[in-house]
């Protein structure tokens, strides 16, 4: 009997020893597969949104071409009929071709346009372009941010807002966005020019680089605002203010729609968190399905609201249909309700359906700092409770990689989520020889890297005695000169042969360096711990930048 028990125990132990490595390998492989799949999903989402943006531009160009053909046909026909000018053979051929091309449109229905809602604009193209423009005409960025401003009697927050938006961008982010300052004073061009010159003197470099541009609408864009119907108990002054504000937003959105993939609505009295741009872009790319209409990065009013630029024509058309009836935030909510709510269901069901297309990012990335409203006499001490403290992490768009670490991750603060900019990486005490690996799939030509550890809540959870090492995809044939990196590695050695030490964390838990181009494409970038730490570790910022071809 004892022999049978012992034999059974031996068999069980043998089975455990045999299958445990296979189980661990399976789990690890599955984890790598899940991480790689998530990265691919983000890349796909980015390409999908850029495709929608390109399609939107194509539709806009087709519409412009149709209008141009109409005008050309009318002009040439008038000249021919009135005998204003003797047509040569070439012009007659052009007229015949134009008539042939346009014949298919004769007698067809005409879709609503901006002239349907603002008929006073018909025949006045000058009323549909900025009356003042200070711009380098930057196009094709990821995010366009619109900042409307007006003349305030007591205090202006504009300079603080622009400084915050610009200062919280790194060099790479400044090349991939556009800030449009919209001076909404169409009847005071002198004020527009004065403010434009002031902004130019304060932010000259950013205007010259194309990051910041300043525009103002023409007075002719606005209809009569003195004979509006009062509603909802609002005074005549308030109705005029909210109506003009709806038209301000509409002009600004239409101006910005062709400039970037996403559009973010802001105000002139906000401050931003560090890394806000990459966080917004990363959150947009994380949306696995393409049915969202609005991403919110603030809980207040019309601050931090992101739209796909391809959707802006529909959004603006809805605003223009009811611009004189309700405030902008009400119209936005009604637009979502019309799109997704079933009238046969209750309000709770409608609320759930709206949340599916109106997605909120927390914590908020923008805080309202103004006290004096743009409406004369109105005091507005609104604060976003979700803004909280300064950012606990900073997001970047990094190259595709398979991630692994010998550290024990704490709860939900996973390495992959930090890499894609969703949160920070948090792990228990590192020991000598622990590593964090970023294996690039496929190998990439790395220009620079940056790692920041700790955050404002856990300032001691930093990386101290640690190095950054790289493994080239192909080992260099000759010696590599790393003297320009000013490394003082002392007796520290790489974890494995073939790796090169190219960075040292300083006493603040920070490291940043360029990668010598002579190393070629990089297979693995590694963080190597050289001693045991009494503290846990947090990676609050991970930036790995590819070298442009």
Image (tube, grey):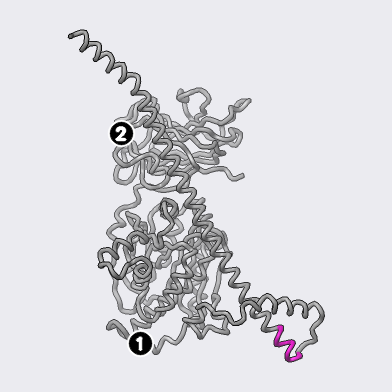
99 to the left or right of 159? right
Residue 428 numbered tag: 2
Q: Quadrant of residue 16?
A: top left
Q: Is residue 175 above or below residue 331?
A: above
476 up-or-down from 417: above or below: above
The residue pinned by badge 1 equals: 229
Name the residue: 54% across, 37% down.
Answer: 442
In the orientation shown, which residue stands out farthest toward the left? 1
Quarter of the image where the C terminus is located:
top right
Q: Residue at x 35, y 71 (%)?
A: 334
Residue 44 rendering spot, x and y as whole percentages: 49, 49
Where does the magenta region start and end? 76-83
Q: State the CA–CA distance, disc 2 to disc 1.
A: 64 Å
Q: Say which element carries label 1.
A: loop
Q: Is residue 452 left or right of residue 400?
A: left
455 to 290, vertically: above or below: above
Question: Residue at (29%, 39%) from the top-left corner?
Answer: 411
């Amino acid at each position: 009997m004892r022999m049978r028990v012992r034999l059974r125990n031996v068999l069980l132990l043998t089975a455990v020893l045999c299958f445990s490595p296979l189980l661990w390998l399976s789990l690890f492989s599955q984890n790598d597969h899940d991480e790689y799949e998530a990265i691919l999903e983000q890349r796909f989402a980015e390409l999908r949104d850029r495709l929608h943006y390109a399609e939107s531009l194509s539709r806009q160009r087709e519409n412009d071409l149709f209008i141009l053909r109409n005008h050309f046909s009318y002009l040439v026909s008038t000249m021919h009929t009135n005998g204003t000018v003797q047509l040569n053979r070439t012009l007659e051929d052009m007229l015949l071709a134009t008539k042939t091309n346009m014949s298919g449109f004769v007698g067809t229905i005409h879709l609503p346009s901006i002239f349907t809602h603002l008929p006073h604009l018909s025949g006045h193209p000058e009323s549909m372009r900025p009356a003042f423009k200070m711009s380098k005409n930057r196009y094709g960025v990821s995010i366009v941010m619109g900042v409307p401003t007006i003349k305030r009697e007591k205090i202006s927050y504009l300079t603080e807002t622009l400084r915050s938006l610009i200062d919280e961008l790194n060099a790479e982010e400044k090349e991939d966005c556009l800030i449009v300052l919209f001076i909404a004073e169409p009847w005071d061009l002198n004020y527009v020019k004065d403010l434009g010159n002031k902004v130019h003197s304060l932010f000259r470099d950013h205007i010259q680089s194309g990051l910041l541009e300043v525009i103002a609408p023409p007075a002719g864009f606005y209809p009569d605002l003195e004979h509006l119907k009062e509603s909802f108990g609002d005074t005549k002054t308030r109705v005029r203010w909210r109506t003009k504000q709806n038209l301000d937003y509409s002009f600004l959105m239409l101006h910005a729609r062709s400039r970037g993939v996403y559009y973010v609505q802001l105000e002139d009295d906000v401050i931003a968190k560090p890394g806000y741009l990459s966080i917004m872009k990363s959150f947009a790319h994380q949306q696995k399905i393409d049915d969202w209409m609005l991403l919110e990065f603030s809980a207040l009013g019309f601050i931090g609201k992101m739209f796909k630029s391809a959707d802006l024509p529909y959004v603006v058309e809805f605003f223009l249909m009811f611009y004189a009836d309700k405030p902008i935030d009400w119209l936005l909510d009604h637009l979502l309700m019309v799109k997704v709510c079933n009238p046969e269901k209750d309000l709770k069901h409608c609320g759930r359906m709206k949340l599916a297309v109106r997605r909120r990012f927390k914590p908020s990335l923008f805080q309202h700092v103004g006290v004096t409203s743009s409406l004369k006499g109105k005091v507005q001490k609104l604060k976003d409770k979700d803004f909280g403290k300064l950012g606990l992490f900073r997001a970047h768009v990094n190259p595709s990689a398979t991630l692994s670490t010998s550290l024990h991750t704490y709860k939900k603060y996973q390495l992959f989520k930090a890499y894609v900019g969703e949160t920070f990486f948090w792990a228990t005490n590192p020991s000598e020889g622990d590593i964090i690996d970023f294996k690039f799939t496929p190998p990439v030509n790395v220009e620079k890297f940056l790692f920041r550890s700790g955050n404002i809540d856990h300032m001691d959870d930093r990386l101290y005695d640690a190095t950054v090492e790289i493994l080239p995809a192909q080992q260099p044939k000759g010696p590599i000169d790393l003297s320009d990196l000013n490394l003082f590695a002392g007796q520290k050695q790489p974890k494995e042969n073939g790796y090169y030490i190219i960075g040292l964390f300083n006493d603040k838990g920070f490291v940043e360096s360029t990668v010598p181009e002579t190393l070629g494409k990089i297979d693995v970038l590694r963080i190597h711990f050289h001693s045991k730490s009494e503290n846990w570790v947090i990676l609050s910022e991970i930036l790995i930048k590819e070298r442009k071809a």
